[in-house]
Amino acid sequence: MTTVDVRVAKARWEQVDLRQHCEHCSLDSRLLDRLGICPGRQVRLVHPTAGPALYTVSEERHETDPGIVRVGRGGRARLEAGDGFSAVLDLQVPDLGPAGAPAGLVERLDDGGAATGLAVLAPHGGGIEPGTEAQAELVGRRLGSDRATVWQCRGWWPGRLSFDRWHITSSDIDPRSFPRLRLIRDRGFAHAVAFHGASLPDEGAVLVGGLAPEAVRTAVVAAVADVLAGSTLDVRLAQDTDGLNGDDPANIVNRLTVEGRTGVQIEQSLAAREQFGPAIAEAVAAVYAGLLRPR
């Protein structure tokens, strides 16, 4: 079973997580058993007229009606919907159609099948965080399939709603919900780097975080600084106080590495991606070319 009819309802007052996180939902324990999944998985909720949005099942909850799915106000707003509505819950997260569709989410893996040097990620490509998928692909081309594997998701939705419909926080991404990501989740890469877009407090900034050793992150900062030299944009190391510092061990860029501590997360403003996207990717590729053994 991959789809089931459900009733989407408001989060209860005690469901603080759902009220604080618009990407999260709760499912009844009997529905989880029926679907054969557990909390942590991603699901689609499909509104009868507004269409789909992606959610992470963050809570298991007993309901009087096992078909009730609860989301917070922000979660319902992702579907431009009111307090309660009928929907279809779908376990198929990525679409199976070609990349570039006017609406949908597609997953892509460029993999030679044996590379363990570098995983290059763009979890929020397409219209979600524009330009990041092109950066990941560029790094993959520069390093070659024997040294780098590229995984990306591209999402689109009309009216600039791609982010609202398809964004899933990197620390929530579950490889069991993404068939191509599942193929590489246990390979144990020496390094991983993820390209992201963000609205950063410092306009025009690039933020380099993750759990990789400081020497690696500093090398990325230095390489990007050379690219941005002479512009009004800046780059810096993420600090513990930065909300987008990428230091969560559950972040997919850290989880894919052999020890869970060699991931680098690169957050970039729209200005940085539009003006310097390819050049930033070239600089990052050069850093990893020096870290990986020669072909």
Image (cartoon, rainbow, N blue to C red):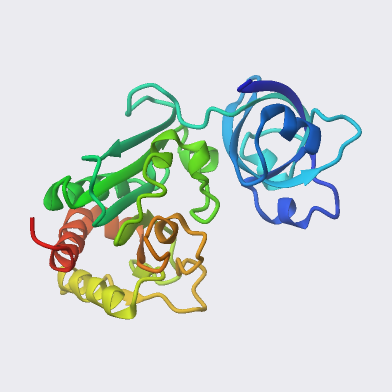
Q: State left or right for residue 23 relative to residue 133.
A: right
Residue at the (45%, 55%) spot, across then down: 252
Q: State left or right for residue 235 relative to residue 226.
A: right
For residue 57, say whether it is visible: yes
Residue at the (80%, 53%) spot, across then down: 15
Residue located farthest toward the right when viewing the structure as drawn: 64
For this rendering, which residue is in front, 34 or 61?
Answer: 34
Image quadrant containing the N terminus? top right
For this rendering, which residue is in front, 21 or 65?
Answer: 65
* Residue 66 position (above or below residue 115): above
Residue located farthest toward the left when viewing the structure as drawn: 295
In the rendered image, residue 18, in percent from the top left (x then y), is placed at: 72, 50
Among the 4 quarters of the image, the one containing residue 9: top right
Among the 4 quarters of the image, the one containing residue 55: top right
For residue 126, say whether it is visible: no
* Residue 145 position (above or below residue 99): below
Among the 4 quarters of the image, the one containing residue 224: bottom left
In the rendered image, residue 16, in percent from the top left (x then y), is placed at: 77, 57
